Amino acid sequence: MTMTLCHDEDITMRLLLLLVLSVGGLLRVAASQPLESTDRGYVWRCGDEYVRFDRGRWTAGIEGEAEFAWDMVLWHDQWIYETLAGGEVDAPPALTDERDQAYAFRLNLLDRDFAVDETVVLENTISFAQQPARYPGQIEPGRQPLAIHGVTPATARVPQYSKLELCVALDATYDNPFDPDDVQLDALFTTPSGRQCVVPGFFTVEHRCEVADGVEVLIPQQESGWRVRFTPQEIGRYQWQLRLRDRSGEITGGGGTVECTPGNCPGFIRTSKSDPHYLAFDNGDGFFPIGHNLPIYHTTGQRGADAMRKFAAAGENFNRWWMSSSSLGIEWEDQIGWYRQDVAARIDQTLELAAELGQYYMLCMDTHQDFREAGWERNPFNVRNGGPCATPSDWFTDEVARRHYQKRLRYTVARWGYSPHVLCWEFGNEMEGWEGASDEVKFPWHKEMSDYLRSIDPYGHLITTSFWTNTGPEQYWDLENIDIVQTHCYTNDDNNVAQTVRRYCLRQWKRFDKPHIFGEFGIRSHSSTADKDPQGWAIHNALWAGLTSFAAGGPMPWWHENYIDPLDLYFHFTALARFTQDVPLGSARWTLLETEPPEFVEVERPPQPRDIVITPASQWGKPEHNEFVIRRDGSIEDERTPQQHLHGQSHQHLKNPPAFVVDYPAPGQFVVRVGRVSASGLLKIWVDDELQCERELPCGEGLGKESVYRPQWKLWETTYDEDVAVDIPAGTHRIRVENFGRDWVTASSYRFTGCQVLVRPNVLVCGMQSESLAILWLQNLDSSWYQHGQGTVPPVAGFQLVVRGLADGPYDVEWWDTWKGVPVRADQIEARGGGLLLTVPELQTDTAAKIRAR
């Protein structure tokens, strides 16, 4: 068979070629047919066979009845490839096509292999081998009487917090070895202190990992069977007894002992006993997570192991892994209740590597992408695929779905709960994304599942969840068994991210006695970051603001494969890791460092009037506040932030229009930057209760800078990106903005011209103190990613800062270069009258300090 491929644009995505074959014959095709455009790609069909291409403008032609030119042996659920007769395999051959239940051949080609308008001809061959009596990794039902034949421990002595693995030879009657209602193995351990704990066992298919041309291929082996993984936490002799159940009854047996000896592992990660806002190991050592997100590593072109070694070399010790359909999700076979064993083997390897590298993972067990749109279409829980759920919302309420989720939790704990390198379990990535699911169904589900997970996890791993609305609904964080408070924040504005990070951190620190982690962070949620901030100023500022504002770990940026890795921005994490190496985060209690407002060293400086720009938050919902008092330095009293959406007539229940109280030293302007408008807008602006401006903002084809029709809501959405301005006289005024249009208007920013008078240094001061150490970060507020991109970062002239709350006496102050992560200056300063006077020379960007009593 001859196939010709050609693309007519220089795209940067992969081409996925999928041929579904019938067994025992050649793929016969008629003359070429044109590709049809679909929402999920381009599809060519011929009878029951089809060729599918990912998005991009491609053309294809298929002629003749020749055999493919790939020399491969085809078995039911595994390709074993021997020689390559042309082209490159960029990913391992796949198993059967999940939905069509047919033999499938997948070939990943990259656009870099083709020039624009170049036609490439591939001549390929496939041969079929005789099927063996038993395929590698084939899972067969059990049909023997209940029996435990023997137990083989991996060792008779195991160091504390290290893995003991038991291989259990057993017989039972079952259809699905992954279903604990069908067959269930447990180990009952008695600790040296007499405490008893139940450790679930699990069924596994062994896999061998081979690497070919930088690609990992996991090959199933004939070996499969039952395992128990256990991590002893006490020194001394442990005893165990096995319990086995199936549909016929229950037996016990297979007992044994193991000796736990002292080891080097610090233990599992807990909420710190010294300070509930931080993390610590069982031995009391603190743990401060530093890392960035790499949840779906195979899309990056990097092997997971290679990426993790690169992380570790830079001082990163933390990452989030998604158990999703496209990554490490296990329940993605054609039926629920069956678990992908090649993926499970990959997680095994990941945790073994974590132990080698000293890294810890937040294991996220689901993500919203699998429960909406195309993800839901192929989700095995979908009723159209044989599952129990008509909608994604049913996943939270349907009894069968909830029970299967608990079974998956049990398997997860059984197979990976042994590892101290699982920092925590995360129920889901951004729970608002489950299409159509409200808090009325999600909140009780979180209560039920967190209680259940706590009850079956013998090691008591921490538990969390996450939301895309920044800090998420507070009621979830109040649940007893939700241990870590999470924030996901994409600012989607041009503001200084340090102020945003600090605001969220202080809010969560004051509200919850729990660790708070920025699980995701970025300046843009959908568009490119590399072109906006190639040096990583936003990463830098977020990391240091989080460190000095009670975050339990460094905020975790997104965009590994197209930003952090190609631009080699790892040094930002290295610098933070070096600074925190001797900071007792998690092993001491921390409080807010009290400081007086900084003052210029030069006593008389003329005021520097500048514009005040307020960037609203991009969250949805009714704003909590509608009155904003703006100080002369540009800050807002009570750290309030207006919301971006100005709701109109269709969302009356969400309306709470903002008003600003501001002092104009001289006549100026109030400027609203109008972004997007839905359906239509009518913007009105009052100054001191007098209407000063009325601006219609219609929506429709050809209006504004861009207009898009939203068929799901049957309306037009128009982007204006225009300023609406009113003149303001000198003096203090109250300015109110309201939208009377059909739907919402977004205010990208509010500008008050000439209102910021800097009588003090334009510096952000962030600091904390423990009994033995104070840390301080000082940032030039103009040193933001946006201002660096504009090339306008004026330095702050020399200033002084008084630190309060320290006992009188001599102190060593160590100043750090935060970009390189090295100390650059040491001062010896005497604290007098409860104050320590620090002098800072000209501040170009930022600096950090460690303050210790001498």
Image (cartoon, grey):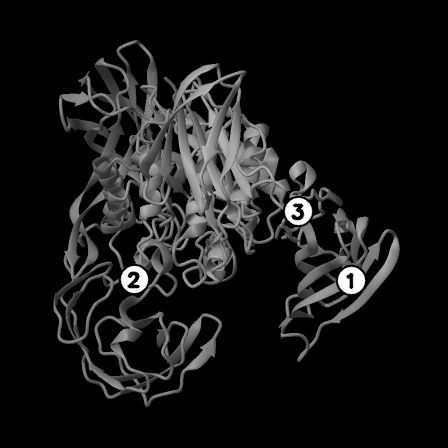
Q: CA distance from mark 2 to mark 3?
A: 67 Å
Label 1 sits on a secondary structure element that is strand
Percent x, y for residue 347?
28, 44
Q: Is residue 787 above or below residue 110?
A: above
Q: Would you call the spot at circle 3 few (<14 residues within 10 Å), some (14-19), or many (20 or more)?
A: some
Q: Which residue is mark 1?
A: 726
91 left or right of 658? left
Which residue is at the far bottom?
Answer: 31
Q: Which residue is mark 2?
A: 96
Q: CA distance from mark 2 to mark 1?
A: 64 Å
Q: Is residue 699 above or below residue 741?
A: below
Q: Residue at x 54, y 30 (%)?
A: 509
Out of 823 and 419, give the one closest to the viewer. Answer: 823
Q: Residue at x 53, y 49 (%)?
A: 496
Q: Could you tell me how many numbered marks the image carries?
A: 3
Which numbered disc covers residue 757?
Answer: 3
Q: Point out the tag, 2 or 1, that comes first from the N-terminus.
A: 2
Label 2 sits on a secondary structure element that is loop
Can residue 587 be seen from the camera position used here?
A: yes
Out of 165 and 459, give the one closest to the viewer. Answer: 459
Q: Quadrant of the N terminus?
A: bottom left
Residue type, mark 1 in image: Val
Can residue 176 be seen from the camera position used here?
A: no
Q: Point out the tag, 2 or 3, that comes first from the N-terminus.
A: 2
Q: CA distance from mark 1 to mark 3?
A: 21 Å
Percent x, y for residue 188?
30, 20
Residue type, mark 3 in image: Val
Label 3 sits on a secondary structure element that is strand
